Each structure stands twice: as structure tokens, then as C-alpha cells.
């Protein structure tokens, strides 16, 4: 879970995730949205992959990225549990 929070702490990586909400995109399509080097973008992709937030698939000459929604569901469950409301304690647990 620590890798997930590290990954989403960076605005560039959050923008990649936001772009992928619209569906799978090639590395080239994603790169068009940024004014950084391909090496820097590759670094961000690697962090997102290490956190298992994105999946990548080679299609011929292209690498195509997509969201791994299962991880987002796990993170949402952890956050809901962390901030759950317990009515027995006046609203906070």
C-alpha cells in the first residue's frame, strides 16, 4: 500500500492516472500530454507499475497502458476503513 501512496503523491503520475480514466493509451499518446523527456515519463510509468496502479501490454511496436482498477478498489476500502464512522463513539472511531 505504501507504493500506492508514493505513486499518487506526484502530480505527473496523478495526471497519467486521470488520462487513463478515459481508457487505455499508448506511451506515445500519454507523452503528448506532457512537456517532459521520455526518460522522465518512463520513470513515472515504472513507479505506477511498481504500485500496480497501471498495467502495460506490448502491441507490436507500442506499449499500451491501462488502469488496474482492482488496486483502486483496495485503496478505497482501506481509506473507508481508516475513516469509518462509529456511531457508538459520538461519530468518530
Image (cartoon, grey):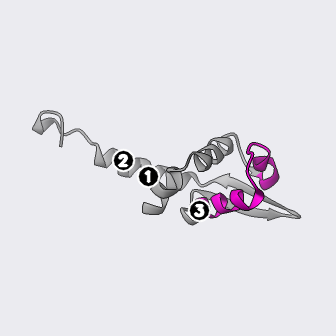
Of the numbered discs in the image, which one, if any, rests on residue 79? 2
Of the numbered discs in the image, which one, if any, rests on residue 47? 3
**Residue 35 quadrant:** top right
Please tell me whether residue 28 belongs to the stretch shown in magenta: yes
**Residue 62 quadrant:** bottom right
Q: Nearer the viewer, residue 57 or 42?
A: 42
On the question of residue 1 being in view, the answer is no
- Residue behind mark 1: 75
Q: Are marks 3 and 2 in contact (CB under 8 Å)?
A: no
Highlighted range, magenta: 26-48
Residue at the front extreme? Answer: 36
Q: Position of residue 21 (x, y in %)?
A: 64, 42
Apparent side of residue 10 relative to residue 89 in the rendered image (left or right): right
Q: Nearer the viewer, residue 30 or 76?
A: 30
Q: Are marks 1 and 2 in contact (CB under 8 Å)?
A: yes
The quadrant the N terminus occupies is bottom left
Q: Position of residue 86 (x, y in %)?
A: 18, 40
Q: Residue at x 36, y 52 (%)?
A: 78
Q: Position of residue 45 (x, y in %)?
A: 66, 59
Amino acid at each position: 500500500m505504501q507504493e500506492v501512496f508514493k505513486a499518487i503523491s506526484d502530480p505527473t503520475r496523478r495526471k497519467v492516472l486521470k488520462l487513463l480514466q478515459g481508457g487505455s493509451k499508448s506511451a506515445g499518446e500519454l507523452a503528448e500530454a506532457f512537456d517532459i523527456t521520455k526518460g522522465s515519463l518512463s520513470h513515472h510509468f515504472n513507479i505506477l507499475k511498481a504500485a500496480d496502479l497501471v498495467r502495460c501490454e506490448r502491441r507490436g511496436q507500442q506499449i499500451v497502458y491501462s488502469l488496474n482498477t482492482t488496486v483502486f478498489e483496495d485503496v478505497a476500502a482501506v481509506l473507508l476503513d481508516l475513516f469509518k464512522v462509529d456511531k457508538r463513539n459520538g461519530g468518530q472511531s
